[in-house]
Amino acid sequence: MEHFKLRLAASHMLAPTVRHLAFEREDGTPFAFVPGQFLQIHFHYADGKPTKRSYSVATVGDGKAPVQRIEIAVSYVEGGAATELLSTLDEGGTIEASGPYGRFCLMDGDTNSRYLLVATGTGVTPYRAMLPQIRALTQSRGCTFALVYGARNETELLYGDEFEAFAREVPGFTFHPCLSRTPRAVPRPHDRHGRAQVALGELGPNAANDIAYLCGNPNMVDEAFALLKEAGLPVPHIRREKYVSSR
């Protein structure tokens, strides 16, 4: 897989400990990826040992044409080497990357009528990239999509306003924020107080109609996987990507 340099074009804080970063390839080449894929950032520890970290591409593309900007969301890990690199990177600064990798994507051959998309934390980024595909599938196949998103409180619902706006615009898409610690001061109709697994159970997973995507915290992914298997979903219809934070 080819390595290339990325230059930071823009960034902002999405949440108190999550930064949204938009990169462009230093050589100006557009970046081709399929929504759901990730790239790897390559760097060195303080002792010179090489390492890398994976980040799902968050760019809202159409899934067909290459994009100029590669967007990712980075969680700050206390004492983390990648945190040190990516939290202090100034606009114009460059990093080394490779990709895209991964198969956590919407599949052309699927014939299901509903998708259950489940996320915690930055695990929601691949679903943001999928939004144009989701819109197209609600029209072409009449599919519905339910996005279940677990966070501790409202400030940690990354891209929450974008998902709410998309749900208003696309009748086949519903957004279910699950706040495990602090509910919103003014709760919204689909809000749940509790973890993502609770809302997932309430959606009544159905082996005949559903394909599920699970992305984020390994415990959530394992628990949701067990719940879906118990509901009868075949293993190939439960697609998983675990986000493990490493120093």
Image (tube, helix red, strand yellow):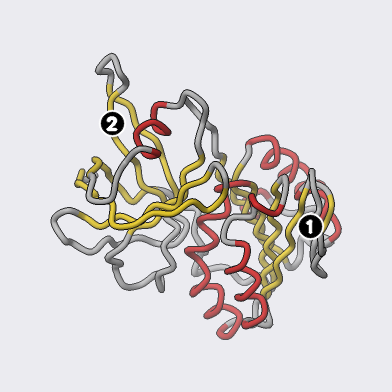
Can you tell which of label 1 and label 2 is closer to the viewer? Answer: 1
In the image, 89 versus 202, the foreground residue is: 89
Task: List x then y, in percent, for residue 82.
Answer: 39, 32
Which quarter of the figure is the N terminus placed in? Answer: top left
Q: Position of residue 170 (x, y in %)?
A: 63, 81
From this view, report whether residue 175 is shown above or below residue 26. Answer: below
Residue type pointed to by label 1: Arg
- Helix, strand or loop at label 1? It is loop
- Find residue 48 and report its image quarter: top left
Residue extending farthest to the top is 47
Please report the residue visible at 24 percent of the width from the left and 49 percent of the height from the top.
Answer: 6
Using the image as rendered, state which of residue 180 and residue 57 is in the foreground.
180
Residue at left 29%, top 62%?
Answer: 32
Residue sticking out furthest to the left: 27
Measured along the vertical axis of the image, is residue 131 above or below residue 96?
Answer: below
Q: Position of residue 23 (x, y in %)?
A: 30, 55
Reading the image, the residue beneath label 2 is 43
Disc 2, SS: strand
